Each structure stands twice: as C-alpha cells, then as structure tokens.
Image: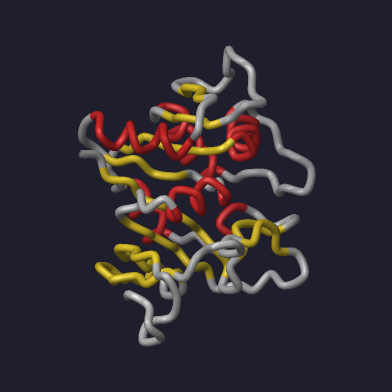
Amino acid sequence: MRELMIDLGTTLDGYASGDGWPGWWGLEGPEYLAWLGEQPPVTYLMGANTYRLMSGFAGGETPAGTAAIEAEEEASVDELTRAPKVVFSASLEEPLTWANTTLVRGDAVQAVRAMKEEGFGILSTLGSVSLCRSLLKAGLVDRFRVVVFPVITGATGAERIYDGYPDVALDMVSTRTFDGRIQLLEGVPRVLAGPPGVNNAP
C-alpha cells in the first residue's frame, strides 16, 4: 500500500504564493535546503495549473508576476524533472513536454485510490490546492505536511490554501525549525464531521 502525503509550503496567513515574491518567499536557508535534499524518492501528483507553472520553470520560462528563480530553486526544479510525475487534467494535450510526466484524464480521486493500491512508495502532492482538498475530503491522505514561512502576504498573497476545507484534526508526528525561522509541522489528518464535543465524532 502506497502512502499519500499532502506537502505544502505556506505563508503564516495560509497563502501558497505571493505576486512578485521569490520562491520560498526568499527565506530558504542552508538547513532547509539540506533537508529538501534528504527527502526519499516520491511520485508527484499535480493539477494542470501547477503543471503549467512548473514545466514552464523547467523550460526556462518565468511566468508574469513571478520572480526569476535562483540557483537553489533551479536545482529543485531539476530534481522534479527527474522524478516521476502524474498530472490530472482534462485540458492538457499529449505529448507533455515535461519529462517523466504521465497525463490522467479521469477522476483524480478514483485514480489516486487505485495508485495507492498498486504498490509501495510515497505519493506526494505538488502545489495543486484544489487537488489536495479533494484528496483530503475523500479520506485518502495519510500524512499532512506543512512548511510555514514567517511572512504575511495580506496585500499580495495568492492561492489561499484552506478555503473550502472540512474541519480537520492533525495528530502531530513531527515538528522542526529550520534556519531559526521556518517551521515544519507534520501530522496524520482526521477529517471531522464538526467541532469535537458537539455531538460529532472526533
């Protein structure tokens, strides 16, 4: 049985990105970058918007409103290019230009459920806010990992992550601080019917 992990990087106020901000909000440091390099191999899952953005970076493009990527980010994109990836989309057309990417046109929840049953290893989301939300609501997520960067992007934040989520409790399994400022929170999610203690199951 494969494990499915939602893996997110966010601002303190819950945005996935910010107009004009560099990658990692310019706050990556040596400890965080070293930790990224220590991660086990995964198969990445994403939607069409994330695919277009990341494949553009891989092809040397810098989308409008996005800061140019730096050397550390280029190395991360190169690693993503080498990794196996699955994109769920009804609008993309084959052949896909980003190497090692498979296109799935069917229902993402059903496809991921089947992928979890196929073998071993880790499936991990890459961005894709709506895909993460759908997989969590379907009860398919085994781990929920968030890296919180200490910045509030109230004026420029884009892609609010948690809008439309159900209530979720996290049984924490790991916390860590990188470079004295970046916070890692990792837990096992439990989707709730409502707040605990109000005639709802926890």
Instruction: Please name the colour scheme applied to the rendered image.
Output: secondary structure
Tally of marks: 0
| 73 is higher (above) or lower (below) than 22 | above
Residue plotted at (48% across, 44% down): 126
| 138 is higher (above) or lower (below) than 195 | above
Residue extending farthest to the bottom is 197
Residue plotted at (45% across, 55% down): 137
Q: Camera-side residue: 35 or 160?
A: 160
Q: Camera-side residue: 138 or 184?
A: 138
Res. 26 in view:
no
Residue 106, given in percent of the width and then of the height, sits at: 51, 27
Q: Quadrant of the N terminus?
A: top left
Residue plotted at (24% across, 37% down): 121
| 118 is higher (above) or lower (below) than 202 | above
Q: Quadrant of the C terminus?
A: bottom left
Left or right? Give the position of 12 relative to 56.
left
| 180 is higher (above) or lower (below) than 77 | below
Res. 119 in view:
yes
Residue 190, given in percent of the width and then of the height, sits at: 34, 65
Residue 83, given in percent of the width and then of the height, sits at: 39, 30
Q: Quadrant of residue 84?
A: top left
Residue plotted at (35% across, 49% down): 140
Q: Quadrant of residue 57?
A: top right
Residue extending farthest to the front is 199
Residue 191, given in percent of the width and then of the height, sits at: 39, 65
Left or right? Give the position of 50 relative to 72.
right
